[in-house]
Image (spheres, rainbow, N blue to C red):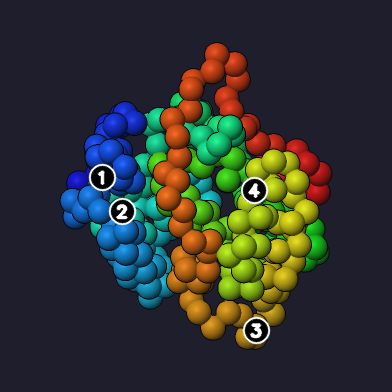
């Protein structure tokens, strides 16, 4: 069972790894083999994504922090005891650190607050809405608020934002390599690859009619049209004494 008040340490998240073996996140099935744990995770989350597609009311679309956390809980509730909870450790990939855990709720609300103020970009021209969706995704990625499972949940949340604004994102139009490149570039401050990727994946929804949407349900597409999982579970971020790592600028701050 999930304990929202628990503060996990780095060691709490991982099983002790024997020398030469890959670390595995502690999971509800007790699986300690890395490859098997990934297989089980994929199967379990695919089932929950399909469940969400059939029952969209399972996650209330408030576009608040609770919405973000609820999506993670929906997908990973069978996998990790901390599903739906922001991480309580600082993490980094390579030399780049994500937002420090003590600031996650504050910064997530700042980002989503700007999205709500712009009414999920409804009424904007497609190009401008696409740019704002890219900025929003960049902000989500810089937070990386969960210990694992961030990309899948980010794609679902961005899909919800796009739908509320009258757009649909077909993630299968973006190749895994393109996703990897666009995400890495946006994290380094270059939005252009992400804007270009979304440009071909964003589909306007016709009023009162159908749209040439993806044939795969949004939840399932966002879950599976993604880069192959790496063996990198992140590294502990050395807590600096300065400001939080990778603070983002919300969409409104970058211009409309």
Where residue 216 appears, x then y in whole percent?
A: 50, 79
- Of pointers 2 and 3, the one earlier in the residue sequence: 2
Number of other residues with Cα within 10 Å of mark 1, as a class: few under 14, some 14 to 19, many 20 or more: many
Task: Return the residue at label 2.
Answer: 34
Residues at marks 1 and 2 touching, judged by CB atoms closer than 8 Å: no
Mark 2 to mark 3: distance in Å? 39 Å
Circle 4/circle 1 CB separation < 8 Å: no
- The picture places residue 141, in percent across and down from the top left corner, at 58, 45
Q: Nearer the viewer, mark 4 or mark 2?
A: 2
Towards the viewer: 182 or 160: 182
**Percent position (x, y) of residue 191?**
75, 50
Left of 235 or right of it: where is 252? right
Secondary structure under tag 1 reads loop
Q: Secondary structure at mark 4?
A: helix
Q: Nearer the viewer, mark 1 or mark 2?
A: 2
Q: Which residue does the numbered mark 1 point to in the structure image?
A: 26
Number of numbered labels in the structure image: 4
- Tell me if 219 is positioned left or right of 140 in this view: left
Q: Say if 151 sits above or below 100 in the image.
A: below
Instruction: Decide which of 27, 253 is in the foreground and name it.
Output: 27
Residue at the (48%, 76%) spot, across then down:
217
Q: Which residue is mark 4?
A: 184
Q: Identify whether 239 is placed above or below 161.
A: above
Give residue 209's quadrant in the image: bottom right
Q: Is residue 187 among what the camera can see?
A: yes
Which one is in front, 29 or 217? Answer: 29
Nearest to N terminus: mark 4 or mark 2: 2
The earlier-in-sequence mark between 4 and 3 is: 4
| Residue wearing tag 3 | 212
Marks 4 and 3: which is nearer the front? 4
């Amino acid at each position: 069972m999930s304990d929202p008040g628990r503060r996990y340490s780095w060691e709490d998240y991982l099983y002790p790894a024997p020398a030469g073996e890959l670390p595995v996140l502690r999971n509800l099935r007790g699986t300690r083999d890395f490859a098997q744990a990934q297989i089980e995770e994929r199967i379990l989350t695919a089932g929950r994504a399909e469940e969400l597609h059939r029952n969209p009311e399972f996650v209330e679309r408030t576009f608040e922090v609770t919405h973000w956390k609820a999506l993670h809980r929906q997908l990973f509730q069978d996998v990790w005891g901390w599903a739906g909870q922001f991480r309580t450790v600082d993490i980094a990939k390579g030399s780049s650190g994500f937002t420090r855990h003590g600031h996650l709720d504050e910064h997530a609300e700042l980002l989503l607050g700007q999205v709500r103020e712009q009414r999920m970009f409804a009424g904007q021209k497609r190009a401008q809405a696409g740019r704002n969706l890219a900025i929003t995704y960049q902000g989500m990625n810089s937070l990386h608020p969960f210990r694992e499972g961030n990309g899948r949940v980010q794609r679902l949340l961005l899909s919800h934002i796009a739908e509320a604004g009258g757009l649909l994102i077909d993630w299968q139009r973006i190749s895994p390599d393109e996703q990897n490149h666009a995400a890495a570039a946006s994290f380094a401050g270059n939005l252009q690859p992400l804007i270009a990727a979304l440009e071909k994946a964003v589909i306007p929804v016709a009023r009162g009619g159908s749209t040439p949407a993806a044939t795969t349900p949004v939840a399932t597409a966002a879950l599976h049209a993604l880069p192959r999982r790496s063996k990198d579970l992140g590294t502990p971020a050395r807590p600096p004494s300065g400001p939080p790592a990778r603070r983002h600028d919300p969409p409104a701050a970058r211009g409309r």
